[in-house]
Image (tube, grey):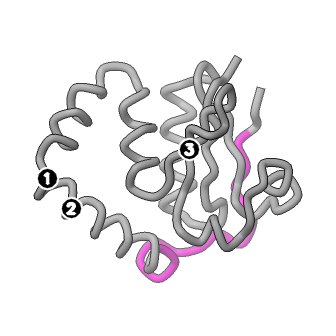
């Protein structure tokens, strides 16, 4: 049973491709997926479109107060994938690199459609 919910931009080509890659690696073990365009499902989690504008989210479904957003969500997601946690720990320990990563995430978030394009239809992962 998946433990984490990934909220992603289902119209962003980069975001959708990233979710496809995570889904292929995870195969439904840890993650379930929700596009930020599904406002009804988001409302059930108490999440608004304005909240989603700050970036992707990862929520621990067993402890919903445990929530990561933006670059912290990417770090949390990657740290949960097999064999990648040590790399994330090293990245997090390097203050300058982490600051650069946070800034890069914000730029990508704010320019994702112009840099990577937008889908005509929302990409949805078929959850188990």
The part of the image, by quadrant, that contains residue 29 is top right
Crowding around mark 3 (Cα neighbors within 10 Å: few <14, some 14 to 19, many 20+) is some
- Indicate which disc, 2 or 3, sits on the residue closer to the N terminus: 3
| Occupied quadrant, residue 39 | bottom right
Q: Which residues are magenta?
A: 112-125
Label 2 packing within 10 angstroms: few (<14), some (14-19), many (20+): few
67 is within the stretch colored magenta? no
Label 3 sits on a secondary structure element that is strand
Residue beneath disc 2:
99
Q: Which mark is residue 95?
A: 1
Query: Do tag 2 and tag 1 residues touch (Cβ < 8 Å)?
Result: yes
Q: Are marks 2 and 3 in contact (CB under 8 Å)?
A: no
Residue 56, image x and y in percent? 54, 56
User: Where is the N terminus found, in terms of image quarters?
Assistant: top right
Which secondary structure, mark 1? helix
Q: Main secondary structure of the magenta part?
A: loop
**Cα distance in 3D space between marks 2 and 1:** 6 Å
Nearest the eye: 47 or 55: 47
Residue closest to the far bottom: 114
Callout 1 environment at 10 Å: few (<14), some (14 to 19), or many (20+)?
few
Tell me what residue is drawn at x 80 percent, y 59 percent: 38
* Quarter of the rendering occupied by the C terminus: top right
Residue at image location 76% in from the left, 37% down from the top: 126
Q: Is residue 122 left or right of residue 88?
A: right
In the image, 88 versus 114, the foreground residue is 88
Badge number at residue 67 = 3
State the separation of the CA atoms marked 1 and 3.
Answer: 22 Å
Residue at (61, 33) in percent of width and height: 60
Q: Is residue 110 above or below residue 123?
A: below
> Is 20 situated left or right of 28 in this image?
left
Q: CA distance from mark 2 to mark 3?
A: 20 Å
Picture coordinates of residue 40 (x, y %)?
88, 58
């Amino acid at each position: 049973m998946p433990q984490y919910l990934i909220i992603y931009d289902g119209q962003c080509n980069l975001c959708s491709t990233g979710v496809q890659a995570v889904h292929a690696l995870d195969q439904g073990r840890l993650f379930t997926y929700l596009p930020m365009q599904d406002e009804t499902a988001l409302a059930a989690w108490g999440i608004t479109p304005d909240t989603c504008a700050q970036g992707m989210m990862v929520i621990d479904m067993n402890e919903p107060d445990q929530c990561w957003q933006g670059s912290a969500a990417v770090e949390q997601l990657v740290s949960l994938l097999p064999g990648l946690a040590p790399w994330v720990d090293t990245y997090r320990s390097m203050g300058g690199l982490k600051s650069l990563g946070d800034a890069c995430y914000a730029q990508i978030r704010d320019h994702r459609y112009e840099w990577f394009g937008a889908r005509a239809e929302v990409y949805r992962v078929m959850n188990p």
